[in-house]
């Protein structure tokens, strides 16, 4: 069983829709990261979470440490949000990240 | 925020030649740099972890003599693909831990070996 599982694998939404991407994990972590990879390949770190909730613009990330689950929400989605969203676990400071398989999001106008 | 600059973004080379990829941390000191490889439609695969001033730690199955990593300063790490072959064609990306910023990634290098 993978240490980190993401769902859904693929997601198509209409512009303006509320989007949720889920990440479940099975190991102890020091932090969880949400990353965004654009079609050109570049990766942007969206959030680093160890507890609770963070918000940045239209993006919201939550984590429930007890349930080992995190969600990434996008409000009022836009075609420019189309990208691959990756959940990654940090199992300790300086340790390598463990990556989920990614969720391919396509937002249609 | 913390920025890692990666060059080149694209490179085409002939089989048998070597290619160097650079990652520079622009506004912070990166004591540790991670090097990843990504196959099409796949997730990132960690190749090695480089620490400033010491030898890199390679993941199982990664040839250290083929993928040479040098981390000679706190702001520069390089990956050299030696004697490149077409099967080395891939997307390579670096990442560094930047304190409270979490992990910051380079923009990636798309290598094509012909």
Image (cartoon, rainbow, N blue to C red):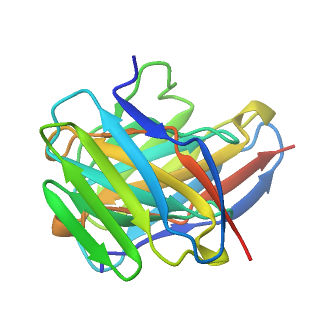
**Is B18 displayed left or right of B33 in the figure?**
right
* Residue B112, position as x, y percentages in the image: 78, 48
Decide: is B69 above or below A73: above
* Residue B72, position as x, y percentages in the image: 31, 56
Q: Nearer the viewer, residue A63 or B94?
A: A63
Residue drawn where x is 69% and y is 55% of the image: B110
Decide: is A80 above or below A44: below
Q: Nearer the viewer, residue B18 or A39?
A: A39
Q: Quadrant of the N terminus of chain A?
A: top left
Residue drawn where x is 33% and y is 69% of the image: A60
Q: Quadrant of residue A54?
A: bottom left
Counting the numbered discs, the total is 0
Q: Nearer the viewer, residue A25 or B102?
A: A25
Q: Quadrant of residue A40?
A: bottom right
* Residue A90, position as x, y percentages in the image: 24, 43
The answer to whether any part of residue A49 appears in the image is yes
Residue drawn where x is 35% and y is 45% of the image: A88
* Residue A39, position as x, y percentages in the image: 68, 62
The answer to whether any part of residue B56 appears in the image is no
**Is A37 displayed left or right of B5 in the figure?**
right
Q: Quadrant of the C terminus of chain A?
A: bottom right
Decide: is A14 above or below A86: below
Residue drawn where x is 46% and y is 50% of the image: A86
**Is A59 displayed left or right of B19 in the figure?**
left
């Amino acid at each position: 069983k993978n240490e980190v599982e993401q769902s859904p694998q693929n997601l198509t939404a209409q512009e303006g829709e509320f989007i949720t991407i889920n990440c479940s994990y099975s190991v102890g972590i020091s932090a969880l990261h949400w990353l965004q990879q654009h079609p050109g390949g570049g990766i942007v770190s969206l959030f680093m979470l160890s507890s609770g909730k963070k918000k940045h613009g239209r993006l919201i990330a939550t984590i429930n440490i007890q349930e080992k689950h995190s969600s990434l929400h996008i409000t009022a989605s836009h075609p420019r949000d189309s990208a691959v969203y990756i959940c990654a676990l940090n199992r300790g400071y300086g340790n390598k990240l463990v990556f989920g398989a990614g969720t391919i999001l396509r937002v249609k106008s | 925020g913390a920025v890692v600059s990666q060059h080149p973004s694209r490179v085409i080379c002939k089989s048998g030649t070597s290619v160097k990829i650079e990652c520079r941390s622009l506004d912070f000191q990166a004591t540790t740099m991670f090097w990843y490889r990504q196959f099409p439609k796949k997730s990132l695969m960690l190749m090695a972890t480089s620490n400033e001033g010491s030898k890199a730690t390679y993941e199982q199955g990664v040839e250290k003599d083929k993928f040479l990593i040098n981390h000679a300063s706190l702001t520069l790490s390089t990956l050299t693909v030696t004697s490149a072959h077409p099967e080395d064609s891939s997307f390579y990306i670096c990442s560094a831990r930047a304190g409270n910023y979490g992990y910051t990634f380079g923009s990636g290098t798309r290598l094509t070996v012909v």
